[in-house]
Image (tube, rainbow, N blue to C red):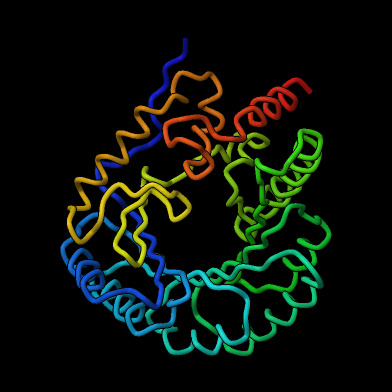
Amino acid sequence: MVIAKAKTLFNQPKFLSLKIDYNLNQDVLNKILNYLNENRSLFAISLFGEGLFSEAAKEILIRAKEVGLATSIDMTAEETSINKFKNIRNIVNQLRIWFELNGDYEYKINYFLELLKKERFNQKIIIILRGEKIDKDFIVRISKLINEKYYLSPFIILNAKHYNEKIIIKEFINSCRIITELHIKNPVKIFIDNPLCGIINMKAKNFCPAGRISFHLDSNGNIKPCHLVKLSLGNIKTDKIDTVWKKMMSLHNQSKCLICKYYRVCGGGCLANKNDILDKDLLCSYFIKLNDKIRNK
């Protein structure tokens, strides 16, 4: 029996993600602002959600900058979002823009890149391309259009509920290999942001940060390892974040995955892709089959 140690756990969180909705109440907002004032461990904060450009979100970003944190926001590729972003451009260090690879996505991305160039934003801009397949020629064409401030992050969608074995073995391996090949040729401009690709490229092992180096707060104050995890481990209105953080670390140390020989490859998978947070990833059998298939070649 192999017993591994949970991958890199920090005694205190380093990154905070915030989902900002329009219903963010003043009590939760005040608790967040106080936490930012008092914390000594955070490096960065990231915001997303329908209330991303609200006054509350702006107040959080301003406070984060005041205490020396790097600030980042995630937004969809909409022209209206660009116009709203202009109002907070001076308090944001990094801009992550999500593109769905469906429909005439190449035209939309080209058009949006032209808008960004006209605005001459000073932020680090990450273009996230989200789809079930990765088109190598398309990624190469897009990478030639972007300047030194832009980065590409192809992101492969995997859904355990509708994927069958033949699709996931063939298409996922192919897409991961494409990303890895492009990353090796241009590691600065094109980076791997999909942990499952670690099965293909051992230098990019799965490292889900949820509850290891980062945590999430929603607009109701619920404290979670990740915004995709349904389980709330506490609430900022009633609990100390340091106490809840210890609960998150203990979950990783209790994971059933620690006794598995494949743990060093998949890292226990994704917390959001489990029926029980301590159980196996729903894609566990695919991890194993993919790993064995590739290593035996």
Q: Which image quadrant: the C terminus?
A: top right
Residue 198, compared with residue 4, is above or below; it is: below
Q: Residue at x 79, y 43 (%)?
A: 171
Q: Picture coordinates of residue 160 (x, y %)?
A: 65, 41
**193 or 228: nearer the eye?**
228
Q: Picture coordinates of residue 136 (x, y %)?
A: 80, 55
Q: Picture coordinates of residue 82 (x, y %)?
A: 56, 85
Judge left or right: residue 280 versus residue 152: left
Residue 8, compared with residue 126, is above or below; it is: above
Q: Picture coordinates of residue 233 (x, y %)?
A: 30, 47
> Which of the 4 quarters of the picture holds residue 28?
bottom left
Farthest residue, direction right: 137
Q: How many marks?
A: 0
Q: Residue at x 43, y 46 (%)?
A: 209
Q: Residue at x 41, y 73 (%)?
A: 21
Judge left or right: residue 36 versus residue 264: left
Q: Residue at x 58, y 37 (%)?
A: 203
Residue 263, compared with residue 74, is above or below; it is: above
> Which of the 4 quarters of the picture holds residue 115?
bottom right
